[in-house]
Amino acid sequence: MDIAYFPGCTLHASSKLYDVQSNLVLNKLGVQLKELDDWNCCGATSASKTDDFLAIAMPARNLGIADHMGLSQLVIPCSACYSRMLVAQNRLELDESLKSEINGELKKKLTGKTKIVSIIDLLVSLIGTAEWKDTTHKYLRTLKPACYYGCMQTRFPIDIDVPDNVENPQGMETILRALGAKPIDWSYKTDCCGASASVNDPDLALGLMAKIMKDAIDRGAACFVTSCPMCQLNLDAYQKQVREAHNIAKSMPVYLITELVGLAMGMKPEALQIDRHFVDAVGPLKELPLL
C-alpha cells in the first residue's frame, strides 16, 4: 500500500531518527511512504502568529502536491505539521474564495481529495492486518508507559472531526496494548511541554515539563511514549535541567511511538537509533523480553 508522506522540517533535522523509524516500521507493515516532492515548511506555529494568509497558504501548497500524487491518504508524523495541514484543509473547504485565491498562485492546485492521517491513526488502522500479526510480538508486556500526546495532536483552533477523543485520546494506548504493554491512566497526556519556550522562556517550559514528569512518575509510569517530535525532544533533551530545578529523582526515557512498535517487531535499538537519545533509553529495555 502506497501512502503520501509529509516529514516536515523537524524529521529532516533534529528528529531525523523519527523519519528513519517511520520508514522502517511502516515498510515492514506493508506501507510504502511516498514523500511529497519539493515540499515546503508547513508554517508551524510561527506563521499563524505573524500572517493568517501564509498560515493557510504554506500548508495548502503541500496539500496541492499531495492531491496530485493520486494517493488516497497523506500521513504526517509530526503533531505540529499534522495540525497545521489539517486546519488548512478544513479552512479551505469552508472558504471557497480563499481556496480560489491560493489556487490561483499554485502550480499544483489544491482539490481536498487526500485524507490526512496522523502516524497514530495509521498504526491503529494496521492493527489486526496480516502484516501486523506476522511482524509484531508482545515483547512489551511488562512495560508501563505514559502516553503523552502533547497539545497539538488533538486540539485545534477550529472544530475538526478527528477519529480520537480530543480530551482523552486513546490511539497510542490502543497500539501499545496490542503489543502487550500496560499504559497508565494519567492526567497530563494533552498538556503542553512548553514547546519553543524551552529556548526563550526556559523557566516556564521547565515548570510545565516538571508537572508532566511528576504526575507520570507518581502514577507508576516507567517511560513516556509520544508521537510529537517537539515533545520528545523537550522531555528528553531538557530532562536533566527539569529534574535539577524541580527536585525530581527519577529519570524517564522518552520513546517515540515508532520506536516501541519497531522494538515489538524485533528491530534492534541501534537500527531504530534509540541509542541517540539524551536520556538512556536502551538500558531500560534490558528489563523487557526483547533483548
Image (cartoon, helix red, strand yellow):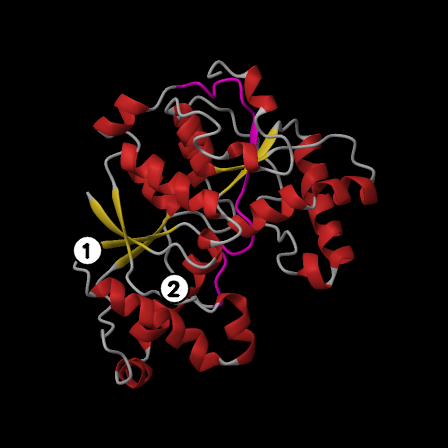
At horizontal 60% and vertical 31% (from top left) the residue drawn is: 223
Badge 1: how crowded within 10 Å, few (<14), some, or many (20+)? some
Amino acid of disc 1 = Leu
Residue 75 at x, y = what percent?
A: 33, 51
**Is any atom of residue 77 visible in this view?**
yes
Q: Residue visible at 42% across and 40% down?
A: 171
| Viewer-proximal residue among 49 and 9 | 9
Above or below, comparing residue 238 to residue 60 in the picture: above
Tell me which secondary structure the magenta stretch mostly adopts.
loop
Residue 107 picture quarter: bottom left
Mark 2: secondary structure: helix
Q: Is residue 139 above or below residue 236?
A: above
Left or right position of 284 against 124: right
Residue 91 percent location from the top left of the image: 37, 73
Tell me if I can see residue 154 in this picture. Answer: no
> Of 121 and 61, which appears nearest the observer?
61
What mark, if any, has residue 85 been given in the picture? Answer: 2
Using the image as rendered, state which of residue 148 and residue 55 is in the foreground.
55
Judge from the rendering whether residue 193 lies leftward or rightward of residue 12; answer left or right.
right
Task: Tell me which corner region of the image, top left, top right, bottom left or bottom right, holds residue 53.
Answer: bottom left
Start and end of the magenta stretch?
138-157
Q: Amino acid at mark 2?
A: Met
Residue 120 spot, x, y in % from top left: 39, 43
Residue positioned 20% across, 55% down in the render: 72
Kindly identify the residue that appears in the image at 30 percent across and 24 percent down: 135
Asked which quadrant contains residue 216, the reply is top right
Q: Is residue 118 above or below residue 170?
A: below
Q: Please tell me the numbered disc located at residue 71.
A: 1
Separation of marks 1 and 2 at Cα, in angstroms: 16 Å
SS assignment at label 1:
loop
Question: Within the magenta stretch, is there residue 147?
Answer: yes
Q: Is residue 66 magenta?
A: no
